[in-house]
Image (cartoon, grey):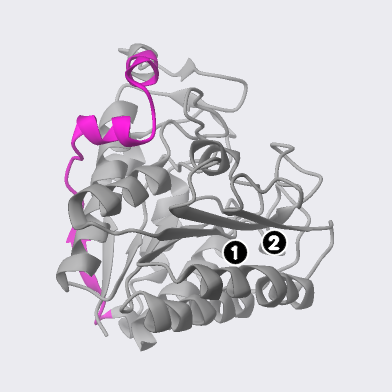
Amino acid sequence: MTTRFYSHPIYLEHLTPAGHPERPDRLRAIARVLEHDVFDALDRVEATLGDEATILYAHPAEQLERVKAQIPAEGIARIDADTSASPKSWEAALMAIGAANAAVDDVFTGKADNVFVAARPPGHHAEKTRAMGFCLFNNAAIAARHAQKAHGAERIAIVDWDVHHGNGTQDIFWDDPTVLYCSTHQMPLYPGTGAKNETGAGNIVNAPLSPQSGGELFREAFESHILPALDDFRPDLIIISAGFDAHQRDPLAEINLEEADFAWATAELMDRAGRWSNNRLVSLLEGGYDLQGLALSVAAHLGRLMKG
């Protein structure tokens, strides 16, 4: 079992205002924990720039140009109350898209069985026509479309365990039955979407968790809603929107997961990838804002991916 890992120094140059939770130190914390010799076998690859045209897989041209126009020549520009951009943010966003699409290529061509992409900015809040929630473009949605267009995949499943609902991914695939979107998330919480009755074309599965839920309820949501949906759908590829802000240490929410819960969910999704997707699984970093909780959770997630 080959696990590939993508990152790039440019992700550290996507700057946010002082005190902002989505900060470059997140990737530095991940890099430090991956220095442990248990990760020596990890196939580390530097990301390359994505093709700007692939943004159009998930966003209209007007939105691409709108975001590009908001990238400042200097300093930090506010896109909305939560989302900002700095001079290197465009390059970082293209590099995040490039890594996500390369990860898809890797699992379809056999270069890797599974891939984890540690990139910034994250993506799952970016709607078709709106950048928001720390996100400029929807990396997971673009990667899903890339799998369909470049590799002829018919059915893509996106499983999102970030503590915040992936409103952007839901928006993009709302009426598209070729993409299954499954999410566990705290509710009520930003962005306010993700109720059980939000089902799209029957391809949206939301399993919201109440504040203070722990691992037992998280696992129950997976077993009762997400895993059966995957078994019914039989995807050609599984993409994980891997946010780690449901960790008990995270300051932005009130779900009490531990590293073992993320490892368990990883194993369950690997099992489904083995059954239906020829082991093809791509994991994209989303949230996670306590540096220790993030680092330990990523280590647990990657360690499980590497076990096969």
* Residue type beneath disc 2: Arg
Q: Residues within 10 Å of mark 1 (few under 14, many from 20)?
A: many
Is 89 placed above or below 139 here?
above
SS under mark 1:
helix
Q: Is residue 209 left or right of residue 173?
A: right
Pointer 1 residue: 293
Q: Which mark is residue 249?
A: 2
Q: Residue at x 55, y 36 (%)?
A: 171
* Residue type beneath disc 1: Gly
The region drawn magenta spans: 40-66
Q: Is residue 51 magenta?
A: yes
Residue 8 shows up from this direction: no
In the picture, residue 206 is in which quadrant? bottom right
Q: Is residue 42 left or right of residue 134?
A: left
Q: Residue at x 46, y 79 (%)?
A: 272
Q: Residues within 10 Å of mark 2 (few under 14, many from 20)?
A: many
Distance CA(mark 1)–CA(mark 2)? 6 Å
Pointers 1 and 2 in contact (CB under 8 A)?
yes
Rendered location of residue 96, percent (x, y): 31, 44
Is 233 placed above or below 137 here?
below
Q: Residue at x 23, y 56 (%)?
A: 152
Rendered location of residue 100, percent (x, y): 30, 51
Rendered location of residue 32, percent (x, y): 39, 65
Quadrant, the C terminus = bottom left
Q: Is residue 80 magenta?
A: no
Rendered location of residue 118, percent (x, y): 37, 55
Residue 149 shows up from this direction: yes
N-terminal of the two: label 1 or label 2? 2
